[in-house]
Every structure is written in structure tokens, then in C-alpha cells.
Image (cartoon, helix red, strand yellow):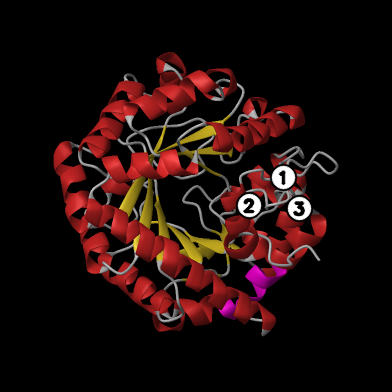
């Protein structure tokens, strides 16, 4: 399947886009992780992969969203993004995840991409603003992959995302990307209302037929002002999603990405390992997107993100506390520890609504991806090798 997938990507992707992916993300991404591992041996943690929510604004109103999308627009300016990326590049970083809100509502998104042709960007989007003109611009710049969220059938999408006609607009964005020969992905936050519809071979085959190159199944995390814990998956369902992804990697000519298990099938948290942290739309430096509590901001230390991250006592304590508590998600399993960390370090609520601690208090502990004794190792050799050496683990749980 690796050869078939490689041929399909080669045949349907712009040559320059493919080269930028291979070099900026593949080769340089591996080098950035090697530098990360060397820093860890010295006791210094600076993530090789930074995720940045560049704006809070969004045209949708999704159930379970933790971003204050209805609040006045906040955004990280072009100059601030430029300072952050330039500084991170000095320390070997080349990959940046771009989130929102809806990233395409940021007026300078394309300018940000164009300013850093030596980097690679993954844009988490609902696809509604991706027209042929926008996709063509991304193709010209060549250094970004859209990861477009699909949350269910037409009816479920409208219910989950608070608008009408959501799925058709999303599919139009996917088609525009494929027509313009971009490396195109589809992401799903798997929950009770979409697991039966989207975690099956028919859906995978439909995406392959459409021209999609890779998929990413997230498991739904009930956080925010309307957490909807009833949508969360049961432990056996989380395990079934994991098993499905592993099986499909060897069976289907489409990539399957995950970030919550290592090569042996053991659960992990990317923030606990230190391989990624998050910057919110107000510039706050957070452990991950769903932990909206921070003690630092990208504007600290004259914009030196390396100094800010490596000297953060709060982030260091978060990584150590999370790794000791669980291999899974501390937010789901131990919200009490999250509150203790916030109080201990005087972390501020980085939301516009200023209710994060009350929301944590209201959370009932849930199971996450940590399911000891039921590990499902990677059986696709190349993916297993890449995970082992370049992307996850690195001794956080030893």
C-alpha cells in the first residue's frame, strides 16, 4: 500500500507542492526532532512542532468548541507570527500547525505562508473559505497542506456545527484543493454521533475516490462552555478507532495520521512528551489547544519564543505532572490536577469568557486513550519506524 499511496500522491499533486512537503516537512522535520532529542538530553525542552491558533473567529458554532468564536476578533498579527516563526527556525523548527477559530478568516494567512517558503504548514480548517482562487494561491506558494474537518453526514454536520449546509460547503473546499493539486487531508473528531458513519471502509473508499490523500481521526474531548460529555467515546470505542486506523494503513492507499499512540501502541500525550505546545489567538503559550491556562505570552522576552518556552516553570511542571499521572489525556482523566497546576503557578485564564477554572471544576473524569493491556502496535513497518525515531515518546514516561 505504501507504493500505491506514493504513486497516487505523485500522480495527483503539483510537483513543487510535493517537493516542499518532502523537504520542508519530511527531511527538515526529522532534523528538527533530532535537535529536540539532543536538547532533552541537556534538560531543555523546546517543541519541534508548534501549533498556533492565529484567530478566534469562525463562521461555525460547533458543539464542544473551546474557542470563543463569538467574541470580538482576536488575531496574532503578521509581524508577531513572523517574529515567532523566525525565532523558532533558529532552533531547527520547520513545521507549524495553523489553527483557529477558522484560519482562513485571518486576513494575512497567505502572506504568512509566503513569507516562510522554507517552512511547512498544516492548516486545520472547515474548508468553507477555500475557493479555487484560494487553493490556487496555496499551490503557488506550495508549502501548506489543508486538513479539512468533516464531522458527519449532512444532518449530523449541521447539528454538530450549528449551521445549515455545512457538509456541502466543506466538500466544495476539499474539491477545490484536489483540483489545484494540493496534498489534502480530512480530519474528524470522532464522537457518538459520527463513529458509525465515518469510521468504516466505505467512508475511507469514498475519500480515496474523491482524491483525498490522508486522514486524521481525533477522539472527541468534551471541554469548553458546552462540553457535551455525552458525545465522548467509551473506552472500547476509542480502542476500535485505533484498531481501524492501524488496519487501514496496511489496506488502503491513503495516509492515516494519529498523535496519541507510539509505535508500540502505548498511549501518549504530545504535550506531556514536549514534542508540541500551543499558542492561543491572544498570544498565550499553552500546553495544548484544550488547556486554556497560561503563564507566558509570545510577546514576553521581546518575542523570543525559545527563551519563553524553555524557561517556563509552568510548562515544565505540566509535562512532568501529566506524564506521572497517565499516558493519556490529563484533561480528561485528572482535571483536578490541571486546576492544581493553574493555582500553583498563577496561570491565567486565556479565554475571553474567563470561566476555564469553573469549567474544569464541573468536569467529570473520563477515560482517554490510555488503556493498559490493550495496546495495538503499529503493523505498517515504515509508519512504525517513523514513530519510533522521529515523532513520539522520547522517554517522557520512563
Q: What stretch is highlighted in magenta?
A: 310-317
Mark 1 touches mark 2? (CB < 8 Å): yes
How packed mark 2 is, by other alpha carbons closer than 10 Å (few <14, some 14-19, many 20 or more), is: some
Residue at image point 69% right, 64% down? 318
User: Where does label 2 land, which residue?
Assistant: 384
Toward the viewer: 137 or 251?
251
The circle drawn on residue 377 is 1
Magenta span includes 23: no
Residue at image point 45% right, 35% down? 253
The answer to whether residue 369 is above or below residue 195 is: below
Magenta span includes 312: yes
Answer with mark 3 or mark 1, whichever residue precedes in sequence.
Answer: 3
Residue at image point 30% right, 53% down? 18
> Which residue in the rendered view is the most extreme toward the top?
155
> Which residue in the rendered view is the most extreme toward the left?
133
Q: Is mark 2 on a helix, strand or loop?
A: helix
> Which residue in the rendered view is the most extreme toward the front?
3
User: Where does label 3 land, which residue?
Assistant: 327
Amino acid at each position: 500500500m505504501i507504493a500505491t499511496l506514493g504513486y497516487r500522491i505523485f500522480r495527483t499533486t503539483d510537483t513543487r507542492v510535493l517537493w516542499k512537503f518532502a523537504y520542508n516537512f519530511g527531511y527538515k522535520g526529522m532534523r528538527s526532532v533530532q535537535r529536540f532529542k539532543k536538547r532533552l538530553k541537556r534538560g531543555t525542552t523546546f517543541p519541534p512542532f508548534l501549533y498556533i491558533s492565529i484567530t478566534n473567529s469562525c463562521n461555525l458554532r460547533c458543539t464542544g468548541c473551546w474557542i470563543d468564536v463569538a467574541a470580538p476578533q482576536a488575531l496574532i498579527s503578521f509581524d508577531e507570527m513572523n517574529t515567532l516563526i523566525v525565532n523558532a527556525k533558529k532552533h531547527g523548527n520547520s513545521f507549524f500547525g495553523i489553527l483557529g477559530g477558522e484560519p482562513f478568516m485571518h486576513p494575512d494567512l497567505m502572506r504568512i505562508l509566503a513569507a516562510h517558503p522554507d517552512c511547512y504548514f498544516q492548516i486545520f480548517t472547515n474548508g468553507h473559505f477555500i475557493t479555487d482562487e484560494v487553493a490556487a494561491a496555496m499551490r503557488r506558494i506550495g508549502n501548506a497542506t489543508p486538513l479539512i474537518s468533516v464531522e458527519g453526514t449532512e444532518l449530523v454536520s449541521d447539528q454538530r456545527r450549528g449551521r445549515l449546509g455545512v457538509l456541502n460547503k466543506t466538500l466544495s473546499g476539499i474539491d477545490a484543493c484536489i483540483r489545484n493539486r494540493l496534498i489534502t487531508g480530512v480530519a474528524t473528531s470522532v464522537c457518538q454521533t459520527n463513529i458509525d458513519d465515518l469510521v468504516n471502509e466505505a467512508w475511507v473508499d469514498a475519500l480515496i475516490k474523491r482524491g483525498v490523500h490522508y486522514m486524521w481521526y481525533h477522539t472527541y474531548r468534551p471541554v469548553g462552555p458546552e462540553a457535551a460529555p455525552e458525545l465522548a467515546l467509551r473506552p472500547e470505542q476509542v480502542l476500535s478507532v485505533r484498531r481501524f486506523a492501524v488496519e487501514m494503513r496496511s489496506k488502503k492507499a491513503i495516509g492515516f495520521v494519529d498523535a496519541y499512540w507510539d509505535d508500540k501502541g502505548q498511549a501518549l500525550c504530545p504535550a506531556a512528551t514536549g514534542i508540541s505546545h500551543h499558542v492561543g489567538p491572544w498570544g498565550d503559550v499553552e500546553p495544548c489547544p484544550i488547556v486554556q491556562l497560561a503563564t507566558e505570552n509570545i510577546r514576553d522576552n521581546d518575542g523570543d519564543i525559545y527563551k519563553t518556552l524553555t524557561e517556563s516553570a509552568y510548562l515544565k511542571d505540566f509535562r512532568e505532572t501529566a506524564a506521572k499521572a497517565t499516558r493519556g489525556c490529563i484533561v480528561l482523566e485528572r482535571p483536578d490536577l490541571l486546576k492544581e497546576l493553574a493555582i500553583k503557578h498563577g496561570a491565567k485564564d486565556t479565554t475571553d469568557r474567563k470561566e476555564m477554572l469553573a469549567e474544569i471544576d464541573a468536569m467529570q473524569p473520563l477515560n482517554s486513550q490510555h488503556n493498559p493491556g490493550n495496546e495495538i502496535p503499529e503493523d505498517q513497518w515504515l509508519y512504525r519506524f517513523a514513530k519510533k525515531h522521529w515523532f513520539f515518546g522520547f522517554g517522557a514516561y520512563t
